[in-house]
Amino acid sequence: MSNKSFAKGSCLCGSVSVSTNSMSNQVGACHCNMCRNWGGGPLLVVKCESDVSFSGDENIGVYQSSKWAERGFCNKCGTHLFYKLIQNNQYFMPVGLFDNCEDLVFDHQVFIDEKPKYYCFANETKNITGAEIFAQFAPPSE
């Protein structure tokens, strides 16, 4: 079970600020092709439930990357702001956005079956395949 805490941060240029009262202390890495294409490497995130507040909303761009999720970014500097599950408004936020995150634990990796061989993390983590993730989060097919 993860601890939840208050966290705040901002994009690179400061045009968008973010805060949450429900940031998990567990960091996860996503190795899916979309995340690696979006950011040039694995996406390192913390789960923040739906309790996320933004200021500078006018600077937030949103791209619906699948039927069930969208990705947000700063329109000015390009910083990645969130990956959000549409159905339940659940945010997964890039851990680098937040200030003072020394107490976090890197404990899981998703889409481990899509991770390229050219990098690897030394941490011992729970490793989850893409099929296992889709079984948990993707809405049923119509």
Image: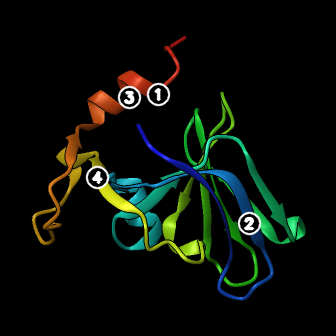
Q: Do the residues labelled 1 and 3 touch (CB within 8 Å)?
A: yes
Front disc: 1 or 4? 4
Do the residues under discs 2 and 4 have CB atoms within 8 angstroms? no
Neighbours of disc 2 within 10 Å: few (<14), some (14-19), many (20+): many
Q: How is the image coloured?
A: rainbow
Percent x, y of residue 123: 17, 62
* Furthest residue toward top: 142
The residue tagged with tag 3: helix, strand or loop?
helix
Tell me residue 32's x, y (percent).
33, 51
134 lies left or right of 89: left
Residue 136, position in %: x, y? 40, 24
Q: Residue 55 occupies which quadrant of the picture?
A: bottom right
Mark drawn on residue 137: 1
Q: Residues within 10 Å of mark 1 (few under 14, many from 20)?
A: few
Figure check: 69 above or below 115: above
Name the residue that disc number 4 marks. 107
Q: What residue is pinned by disc 2?
A: 18
Q: Looking at the figure, which quarter contains the N terminus?
A: top left
Q: Residue at the location (66% across, 35% down)?
A: 86
Which residue bears the numbered disc 3? Answer: 134
Q: In this view, does 25 lie to the left or right of 82?
A: left
Name the kind of residue labelled 1 in the image. Answer: Phe
Residue type (three-letter) at the residue carrying disc 4: Asp
Q: What element carries label 4?
A: strand
Q: Earlier in the sequence, mark 3 or mark 4?
A: 4
Q: Along the line of sight, which residue is nearer the eye, 99 or 65?
A: 99
Q: Dot 4, crowdedness within 10 Å: few (<14), some or many (≥20)?
A: some
Measure the alpha-carbon separation of dots 2 and 4: 24 Å
Marks 2 and 1, Cα distance to the nearest angstrom? Answer: 24 Å
Compute the Cα span from label 3 to label 2: 28 Å
Q: Which residue is found at the position 42% from the left and 58% from the top?
A: 35
Q: Mark 3, mark 4: which one is toward the viewer?
A: 4
